Image (cartoon, helix red, strand yellow):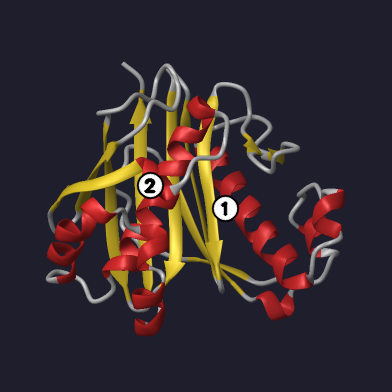
């Protein structure tokens, strides 16, 4: 499988970010061996497109960990499909059609990070999916964001995905989009408030910032959470 390093997104976090463009059509199962990546049984059963995306994400993760001088820079997968980062590291992986990214850092205290890449939704999807992604009390901020970007729902969806990934290590269970409410925004950052007690570290009233950027037909979001 062909992969090319990309600088399409800016990194707004003090962590190592790797973004790769990849050609899924050139993927074949032997590509896992070529890139020295483990090939999980669950992924072997997936369609080739899913295998290619998984591999691209793991290549990004290995390159990010290598940049941090980690001796065994391999990210395995837990039974709940969450990435298992090497000891004393943490990170996040994302991918969509033809592009993948991973971010990693050294774990000096309890920290979580989430990144997400999404293709911008069609206008019809932006309308249809609002009730699934937005809280009723987010509508005002949603319309404010719509004055700044062409696809506000795509941005909020991606931001909430990044929040979920960043907080999951502390919550350890699924939680829905309604648990985070958009309360403030500017041209590069969205601020959300957690609306339910999710764990000891993630309590109602917690504010979480998400960096966002739109490039061509993509939105990229980053969320860093550190416990006090």
- Report which residue position mark 2 lands on: 178
In this view, the residue in front, 99 or 78, is 78
Q: Which residue shows up at 79% across the image and 63% down it? A: 31
Q: Which residue shows up at 45% across the image and 42% down it? A: 164
In this view, the residue in front, 156 or 116, is 156
- Quadrant housing residue 113: top left
- Report which residue position mark 1 lands on: 60
Disc number lying in front (1 or 2): 2
Element class at badge 2: helix
Quarter of the C terminus within the rendering: top left
Q: Which residue shows up at 19% across the image and 55% down it? A: 188
Quarter of the N terminus within the rendering: bottom right
Return the mark for residue 210: none
Where does residue 194 sit, x and y in percent of width and height? 31, 35
Q: Residues within 10 Å of mark 1 (few under 14, many from 20)?
A: many
Where does residue 16 sit, x and y in percent of width and height? 43, 42
């Amino acid at each position: 499988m062909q992969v090319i390093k990309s600088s399409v997104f800016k990194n707004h976090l003090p962590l190592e970010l790797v973004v790769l463009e990849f050609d899924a059509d050139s993927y074949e199962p032997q590509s896992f061996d070529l890139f020295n990546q483990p090939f999980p049984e669950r992924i072997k059963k997936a369609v080739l497109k899913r295998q290619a995306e998984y591999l691209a994400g793991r290549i990004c993760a290995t390159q990010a960990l290598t940049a941090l001088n980690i001796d065994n820079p391999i990210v395995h997968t837990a039974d709940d499909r969450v990435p298992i980062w090497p000891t004393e590291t943490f990170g996040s992986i994302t991918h969509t059609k033809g592009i993948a990214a991973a971010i990693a850092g050294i774990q000096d205290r309890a920290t979580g990070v989430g990144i997400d890449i999404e293709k911008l939704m069609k206008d019809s999807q932006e309308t249809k999916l609002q009730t699934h992604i937005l809280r009723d009390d987010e509508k005002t901020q949603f319309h404010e964001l719509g004055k700044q970007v062409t696809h506000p729902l795509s941005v909020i969806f991606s931001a909430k995905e990044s929040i979920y990934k960043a907080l999951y290590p502390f919550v350890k269970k699924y939680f829905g989009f309604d648990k985070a409410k958009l309360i403030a925004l500017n041209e590069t950052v969205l601020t959300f408030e957690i609306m339910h007690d999710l764990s000891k570290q993630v309590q109602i009233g917690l504010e979480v910032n998400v960096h966002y950027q739109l490039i061509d037909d993509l939105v990229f979001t980053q969320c860093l959470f550190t416990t006090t």
